[in-house]
Amino acid sequence: MKKTMVTKAMAVLLTAAMITACGGNAASTPTSGSTTATTAAAKTETTETTAAAASSAAEEEGGLFNREGYPIVNEPITLTIGYVANPEAGEWATTDYVKRLEEYSGIDLEFIEYADGTALSLMFADRDYPDMIMGCGSDKQIADAAEAGDVYALEEYFEYAPNWVDFLEKNPGRKASITFPDGHIYSLPCIDERADYEMRDVWYINGAWLDELGMEIPTTVDEFYEAMKAFKENAGKGTIPSNVEPYYARGITQNIGGALDLIASYGLRVTGESTYATIDDNGNVEFNFANPEIKEPLLFIHKLVEEGLMSKDGFTDDRNTGISKESYEGSYSEYVGYSEGRVAFGPLDSGNGKKPISRSQTSPIQRNKFTMFKTCQYPEVVMRLMNLIADEEWTVYDFFGAYDELDSCVEKRDDGTYYVKDKSNDRDHHYRTLENNIPSLMSKERADKLVFAESFENYERAMAAAAYDEWMMPNENLFPSFVYSDENRDRISELQGDIKPFIQQTLNGWALNGGIEEGWDAYIDQLNVLGLEEYLTLLQEEYDRFKANMN
């Protein structure tokens, strides 16, 4: 896509309109490259020489680009951006966000769409790089390309990205998360530090049915059991459907919609995040899926299944199927609520003397949303573009839609807050922005300026996050997301591939069929055979290195 560069005057008008009106990681592993070592070295040397010459010219007084102000460039240039296709997101080039980004920056953006992770891997293997990629690339792919000398170390150009410098200086943990083992930063993340985003699922119950039965919202495990039992016994009466499923969960360990919220009510830190591990209060990696205390909540879950109070279908349904059943579910966990009459509740007091826990998640930082290759001749220009994307107003735009007179999704108020209108509940806004596929920067300070309309889908989450605050698992207890060392990365992935499916299958089986007491010892033995001890040792080693990098 090519656009005519706007003048500085037009850029100012665009800025005024925006302000005064209103507004993953590919997991594939690269195959061996087909380029010979000699050719590859020559290619890298030529690319670096060309880029250096272009950069020198760009920095001259009155040269190609402006260090401050907009547009970024004084004459049209074209940058290529690679990304992996997503049928739900459509073509990036056609989004309103991209069109306005081009107009405001003065940069023509051309997009290369890779059909899938395999196509992306072939690009890395052939070293047929665009100027940059967004929303894709695994740690290994980027690390291997960096080792080959094909990727820019971004910190060398941070002088052109003050938004990122300011954030990373204030948040050493976030900086450590995106720093590669060699000490360089080769990619920028998408940051989302909204309080409701740091919370995992919201646990819902049908408040309308409780009202019809004269029951209160449950606060204990026993009260929850009585509520589910009442839903079952009154199927077909009032507004309770005859095919009611009192409690619905997508198995035990699913991160979205699983029964982990019920297990956490027993005071156990459990997570469906990638490692299944958490951190205890002394900084040690813990693994509650091998903790005998998990037997108690699993026995209760089996009781619910056995008495017909918990759906068996949930153990095999995909997420979309689960969402379609919400009209006859009495209680369920989800990322966002969709049905009338549902109210957020929990966590529950199990009666075992331990404080119940509300789950949180590590994904406020999503790595590898932007990587720049040395095929790019204008690294300073690109970093200024990344700084623009990370600007506060452009971040709000990317998350929630445009704020202008023609298509108002967000209103910027005089007090500096952003009112996210109910129009943003229209999923069409996802086709107008790039969402979490680019390095937007929704810091906590910025998130605190968001005000949601009550009809907006995130309003209920924001209210639930405030209510759950006293039970929320502290961020320090989450196993963070960061780049593993080269020597441990592949082994950790291999062990995960054996351990996690075994846990999922076994715990689901106990929930459906019972037998946890008789099968526990064999379960632990098999985890040890699969390498649990080595797995936790490697995670501890990597976590200790991560903590050291924060200092």
Image (cartoon, helix red, strand yellow):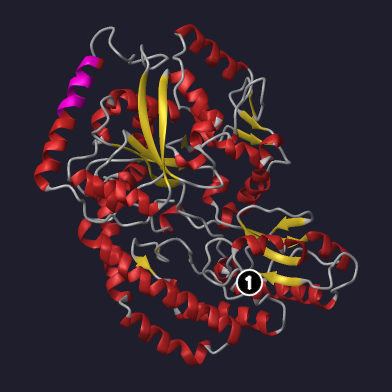
Q: Residue at x 71, y 36 (%)?
A: 422
Q: Residues within 10 Å of mark 1 (few under 14, many from 20)?
A: some
Q: Nearer the viewer, residue 173 or 398?
A: 398
Residue 241 in picture, x, y percent from top left: 84, 69
The answer to whether residue 52 is magenta is yes
Residue 48 in picture, x, y percent from top left: 17, 30
Residue 261 in picture, x, y percent from top left: 58, 65
In the image: residue 227, left or right of residue 395? right
Q: Tell me which amino acid carries mark 1.
A: Gly
Q: Residue at x 55, y 52 (%)?
A: 199
The image quadrant where one finds the N terminus is top left
Q: What secondary structure is found at the residue carrying circle 1?
A: helix
Up/down of 331 relative to 369, above or below: below
Residue 187 visible in rendering: yes
Which of the 4 quarters of the picture holds residue 206?
bottom right
The answer to whether residue 513 is magenta is no
Residue 172 in picture, x, y percent from top left: 33, 42
Residue at far bottom of view:
518
Give the extent of the magenta segment. Answer: 49-57
Residue 161 visible in rendering: no
* Residue that carries the numbered disc 1 in the rendered image: 314
In the image: residue 46, left or right of residue 544? left
Q: Residue at x 29, y 63 (%)?
A: 540
Q: How many marks do you count on the picture?
A: 1
